[in-house]
Image (cartoon, grey):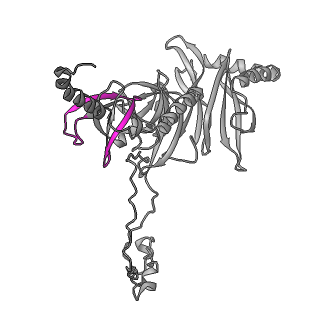
Amino acid sequence: MVPFRSSSLFLLPFLLLFSSCSQDSVGPPPLGEAYAGPASLPLRQDISLRSAVSGMAKHGDRLEVLEAKRRFVKVKTPQGQLGWVDVRLLMSPEQMKGLRDLKEQALKMPSEGTAVVLEAVNMHTEPNRLAPSFAQLAEKTAVQIVDRKVTLRSQSAPRSMSFSRRTVRRRPVKKKPGGVDIPPPAPPGPPANWLALSQTPKMEKVDERPASESKDGKAFRSRKKEGPASDDWSLVRVKNGSAGWVLSRMLNMAIPDDVAQYSEGRRITSYFSLGQINDEENGMKDHWLWTTMAGVRSDCDFDSFRVFIWNRRRHRYETAYMEKRLLGRYPVEANIDGKVGSFAVITENDDGKWVRRTFALEGYQVHKLGEEPYIPGETPRAGQAAAQAGAKAEKRGWFSSIAQRLHKLFAK
């Protein structure tokens, strides 16, 4: 028989207290998982925004959601930091996967030109002002434009995540024997004039004629119908490979100023170099292709394109080719093969069908090589157009070659 020691009896309460504390430290299981949306997400000790910061999470950090109060949740970082955050600043696993897919998609898309950030601007996961902003671009940061989209300014915020404990169903209350069920009261009936309330009021007819044509000679104020406000967004690709949506008005295309001065208030949506020429006074100068658009339009990505050539004799840029009042769509492609620069634009023809038209810049002249139906992902790249341009240049005959030599001679 083992003798009982008084020391064991003394340690028994401490062992019971330690076991209960360890069970309480485990706590209930987490409500779910989420990811930090902003570039830096402060964790606060309480749900108040004035509460002290207890930790910090970076964009993409996986967080465990432990507790939920209204639109605030208590999270735990991989480093073990605890704090409260606004649930609207978190991203769901589906949103995080969509952001990764957007990055991979943007890496495969051709660049429509380099733009410079005018001032600090946020990158969003969607073309929506209320969408999570996961990074901020500093002023004068260079980005690549790969796509654009027009959306309504008054959009609703993306649906945020909701976390709550599973509610426990209460057992139904047993009725007492002999009890009588009381039916609920009948709903109130419609008002007596419900037909009149359902009719649409007639709109007042506005006389938009000038005062000289109105009946009483008084001027009427014309009411111009304007659509809802829209935002023009650009999908940009940063040097580190990340991609996101930025307001287009915060970007400035990095085409030289001696070419950009001819935009006449129109916004440059893409630009490409079609070759270079050596000017003894100004050095190497590029021939440029650009696309522009007036205002904010959702039915196209540009409504005109223009080719600029550098005149060595006059030491200035001149227009070699231009088309206006059209509907164009991304992507615009350009390529240089030797002395021939080629480009392809996707436009809508008179029949309402989209076609891909290919052009070549030979010397100072732009020639159309042909067009074909536009099928996304199945059309040849613009690099093949340069080879076609070189082959067609050899078949144009002696008259075309003499004209090219005379043009180059007078341009010097």
Q: Quadrant of residue 111?
A: top right
State the residue in front, 21 or 213: 21
Q: Is residue 293 magenta?
A: no
The residue positioned farthest toward the top in the image shown: 280
Q: Position of residue 253 (x, y in %)?
A: 47, 30
State the residue in front, 12 or 133: 12
Would residue 327 be found to the left or right of residue 260 on screen?
right
Q: In the picture, which quadrant includes the C terminus? A: top right
Q: Residue at x 24, y 42 (%)?
A: 47
Would residue 194 be found to the left or right of residue 402 on screen?
left
Q: In the picture, which quadrant includes the N terminus? A: top left
Q: Which residues are magenta?
A: 44-71
Q: Position of residue 221 (x, y in %)?
A: 38, 69
Would residue 73 be found to the left or right of residue 3 on screen?
right
Q: Residue at x 41, y 85 (%)?
A: 189
Q: Position of residue 257 (x, y in %)?
A: 45, 26
